[in-house]
Structure formats: C-alpha cells, structure tokens
Amino acid sequence: MTTRELYRSEQLITPPVMEPIDLDEVKRHLRFTTGSEDTLLDTYIAAARGHFEEQTGRQVMAATWEEQFEGFPVTLTDRPYPGGLIELRHPPLLGVLSITLPDGSSPEPTLIEGTDFEVDISTGPYARPGVVRPIAGGAWSSATSGVGSVRIRYRAGYGEVPGDVPELVKATLYFLVGHFHKFRAEVYEGAPGSSIQAMPIGAETFLRAFKYSALPSQPPLRTTWA
C-alpha cells in the first residue's frame, strides 16, 4: 500500500475568557505598587501566556479548537504502533465536543462517542496530548474526500478558572512577565563600553519541560496515495 502524510489544519474557535494570573498577583510578584503601568502589565500577562503556549504547544486556559483532516488515518498493520490513533494538539485535552463529516447534507453526519469512537485523556501538569481512536473492534472510514471532510472539535486547557492551572505554570508566567517588565526590548546594553547582549528568558528550563511532554508520541498520520 502506498501512503502519504495526512493533511491536517487547525482553527481556534473560542479563545479563553480570562488569563491564568491576574494583575494584583503580578504586581505582588514584581513588588510594584503603583497603578501607572496597569495597562502595560495586562499586556505583558497576555504576552507571557501566549509565549508559553507558542513555545510549549499547550493550552493554558480552556479554549475550543477544531482540527480538520482530509480523511481518517489508515491503519498500517505492518507497523509497530497502534493504528487509527489521532493525537489532538494543545494538551491537556478536556473533552471532545464533536466529530463531524461535512458532506453538504443537513444535519451533518456526526460520530458518537462511545459508539463510534473513544477518547483517552491524560491529566496533570505534564499531560500528554489526548487521543481519539475508533471504538474497540471498529475502524475509521477509509474514504478521503478532501480537506475539511473530517472535523474534530474539542476543549483543551488546564481548566476554566485560574485555580485549575498548575502552580508551576503560573510561576513560569510570573518569570516571563518579570522579564518583559524589566527588559523592555529584545536586547539591552550593559555597562558603558560593553557590547549589546540578548537577555535569556529565565523560564526557559520550565518551558522546555512542558514542551517535551506535549510533543506527539505517535508518527505522522497517513492516508492512501490518491
């Protein structure tokens, strides 16, 4: 069987409604009491969360994502890993909302959790990507109908409120905000006559740990050659 990598894309459907750390917490961390830079600090909070998510591939606060595929992955029985697994990006996975197969009809064909597919959810600060798989004894359809013919919509994030976010994630965000607040440019100049140097972000060690545990554990999804 000749195969190629399955095309997939993603779209943020509903962004988070709040940030994981608030302004008062940040000001206590910075030992900064005035309100003269509140708007700027709010920007840094959003930037820190966005940087964490971009660098690690994780979702901090709950948000709704949709991944679109040109079909379901084929199961290669000669490969030493389970077939048909679809890893969803942006862990931790909170739950799958729907799997639809748009074909122009109304209502759109929809798969049913527990009947057509099952979901594996990993939890904890270093949760692995969630997995969608055919129900035991079942299989995905082998038809490939073009980009967007399979759409998986799901909720991802540590939770709906800041209290759900692990403390180590919050600590990393405090480090990032502190960095943005103190060093307001990508580079800085030290003592007179010294060279301009880039400032390392002190949270890099934490970012790496969260990133590696969020990386896919499965090989790229495959489809038959069209």
Image (spheres, grey):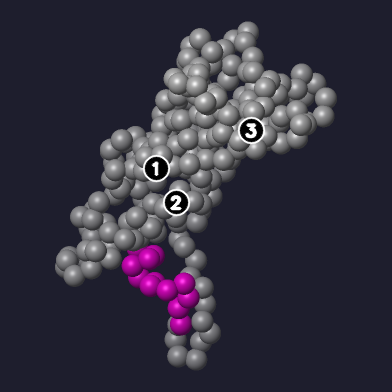
Q: Quick one: 92 or 170, which is closer to the camera?
A: 92
Q: Please report whichever mark, 1 or 2, sits nearer to the chain's N-terminal start.
A: 2
Q: Are marks 1 and 2 in contact (CB under 8 Å)?
A: yes
Q: Which residues are magenta?
A: 178-189
Amino acid type, callout 2: Phe
Say which quarter of the image contains residue 45.
bottom left
Is residue 226 shown left or right of residue 43? Answer: right
Residue drawn at 64 percent across, 18 percent down? 141
Can residue 175 be seen in the rendering of this structure?
no
Could you tell me which secondary element the residue under label 2 belongs to? helix
| Crowdedness near tag 2: few (<14), some (14–19) or many (≥20) residues, C-alpha within 10 Å | many
Amino acid type, callout 1: Val
Reading the image, the residue beneath label 2 is 52
Is residue 203 shown left or right of residue 223? Answer: left
Q: Which of labels 1 and 3 is toward the front?
A: 3
Residue drawn at 28 percent across, 45 percent down? 18
Q: Which mark is residue 60?
A: 1
